[in-house]
Amino acid sequence: MTGDASASASEVLATLRSRGWRLGVAESLTGGALASALVSVPGASDVFRGGVVAYATDLKASLLGVEAALLGREGAVHPEVAIQMARGIRVATKPAGVLTEVGVATTGVAGPDPQDDAPVGRVYVAVVTPERESVTEHQLAGDRATIRAEAVQAALELLRVSL
């Protein structure tokens, strides 16, 4: 993990801790790298509930509650898919009876080929909190590893500004 990602993850976790909020992560193209960045920070377990890597499109529906009709119509690389993933992880990671306060999601195309009419490097990141819902679109450049690493950083940045 880069120093920037480590510092960003530490800052996000500290902010969550100060607010008394917990976090769930829903990942597609990042394949667990966002969760890994967060758990690399000592003490992450007091706010990080867990995550789901829904790499296959159908798992976005079955595990995270993304509307199957939306996935069929738009594919997995779409801003509303990212928002629904972030909403869904709040449910999937909730403690008894109470939603996890913050959900973050990543979906996109790391390459080498386009997917669902989206070009390589197209990434959507979403954050859902009790106060707001945000989604950002990115067009990242580079190889698979670079796109995935930059998507993690984009998710940490959206978390930072959303909190």
Image: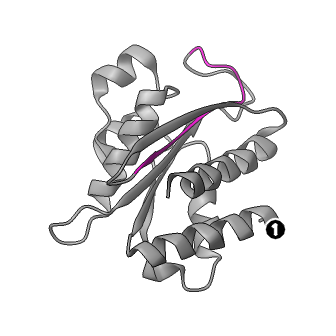
Q: Please tell me which residue is depicted at 41% across the width and 72% down the height of the picture.
A: 19
Nearest to the observer: residue 155 or residue 59: 155
Q: Is residue 127 magenta?
A: yes
Secondary structure at badge 1 equals helix
For the view shown, which residue lies furthest in the right direction? Answer: 142
Q: Is residue 77 above or below residue 146?
A: above
Snapshot quadrant of residue 113: top right
Residue ID for mark 1:
3
Snapshot quadrant of residue 34: bottom right
Residue 144 located left or right of residue 46: right
In the rendered image, which quarter contains the N terminus? bottom right
Q: Is residue 32 magenta?
A: no
In percent of width and height, residue 75 lies at 46, 22
Q: Is residue 161 above or below residue 9?
A: above
Q: Please tell me which residue is depicted at 53% across the width and 27% down the height of the picture.
A: 77
Q: Please tell me which residue is depicted at 74% across the width and 50% down the height of the picture.
A: 149
Disc 1 packing (10 Å; few <14; some 14–19; many ≥20): few
Nearest to the observer: residue 18 or residue 23: 18
For the view shown, which residue lies furthest in the left direction? Answer: 97
Query: Given the image, on which type of amino acid does mark 1 rest?
Result: Gly
Nearest to the observer: residue 41 or residue 111: 41
Nearest to the observer: residue 161 or residue 59: 161
Would residue 108 be seen by someone viewing this image from the given angle?
Answer: yes
Residue 24 located left or right of residue 31: left
In percent of width and height, residue 141 lies at 81, 32
Residue span colored magenta:
117-128
